[in-house]
Image (tube, rainbow, N blue to C red):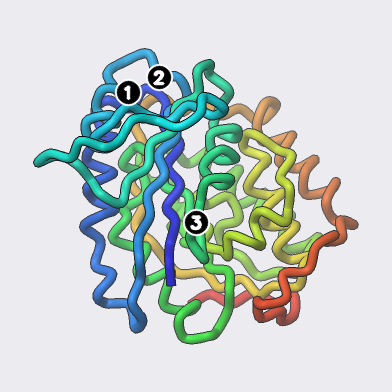
Amino acid sequence: MKLSVLIPVYNEQTSVETIVRRVTAMDLASVATPVELELIAVDDCSTDGTPAILDRLHGAPAEVPGAGPQSGRTGGPDTVGSLRVIRHPVNRGKGAAIQTALAAATGDFVIIQDADFEYDPADIPRLLAPVVSGKTAVVYGARPLDGSGGRWLLDFGNRALTWVTNVIYGTRLHDMETCYKLLPTALLRSFRLECRRFDMEPEITAKVVRSGYRIIEVPIDYRPRTGGKKLSARKDGLPALQALLRYRTWRPTETVATLPITDHATAHG
């Protein structure tokens, strides 16, 4: 099995190196099958020290979409061999960075890793376990959503959106908006994602369920970021709700025949 970890990055000079090294240090030996790891960091035209840090970790200048072949990697004591770095020449947003990373992924499965410290890569091997055991092809990392870190209003909104998801789609999810969604690369590509912000999570969830895949949730640790994230009901919550309503009649146009399709039920593992 090969896992592609997609890392959208924008102005994360204080955390990006630590996140990259935490991803490469996660205990994949605990997974019941050999796992090859691929990291794809997409720098969305950062204006701080992030580009220099990523170039050092990559051992070469970042790739630029459409710019042709890049120079070879020089290596060095800081180089992370499994890391690939792509840079947007202009800022296009997190959704576009994820799309760029997804297009470049060569793994069987993908998961999105934010470049801050909210999600701990040490949890990723536990998300792989239900896939390796054949229980499902789609696993979500479920956060506590208990209002810790002063996020009671945001957590309430997440719980409300998850409740709406369960009502509309007949699921039993605890955290629909989680960033940690592990699913087959071919399946995610087949969705041809349209949303770019907070509404991307409900779009993915709606299309997973409408495609007939079972979602298993695994509890994860979560450390809310103290600053820098400002979500609003109008700019983020309303589009997420609209996405849930818009995709309730969506039908898959591609069949990913190699994946186990089950029913629309979900399980909390």
Do tag 2 and tag 1 residues touch (Cβ < 8 Å)? yes
- Of the image marks 1 and 3, the number of the one nearer the N terminus: 1
In-front residue for pair 237/132: 132
Q: Residue at x 56, y 64 (%)?
A: 183
Q: CA distance from mark 2 to mark 1?
A: 7 Å
Q: Position of residue 255 (x, y in %)?
A: 78, 68
Dot 1 surroundings within 10 Å: few (below 14), some, or many (20 or more)? many
Task: State the residue lying farthest toward the left.
Answer: 77
Residue 233, quarter of the rendered image: top right
Dot 3 surroundings within 10 Å: few (below 14), some, or many (20 or more)? some
Asked if 237 appears above or below 21 in the picture, the reply is above
Q: Which mark is residue 218?
A: none
Q: Residue at x 28, y 29 (%)?
A: 55
Q: Amino acid at mark 2?
A: Ser
Image quadrant in which the N terminus is located: bottom left
What residue is shown with label 3? 106
Q: CA distance from mark 2 to mark 3?
A: 25 Å
Element on which disc 1 rests: helix
Q: Position of residue 96 (x, y in %)?
A: 60, 32
Q: Residue at x 74, y 35 (%)?
A: 239
Q: Residue at x 27, y 25 (%)?
A: 13
What residue is shown with label 1? 51
Residue 262, quarter of the rendered image: bottom right
Observer-side mark, 1 or 3, equals 3
Q: Amino acid at mark 1?
A: Pro
162 relative to 38 in the view: left or right: right
- Of the image marks 2 and 3, the number of the one nearer the N terminus: 2
Observer-side mark, 2 or 1, equals 1
What residue is shown with label 2? 46
Report the number of discs.
3
Residue 50, quarter of the rendered image: top left
Q: Amino acid at mark 3?
A: Thr
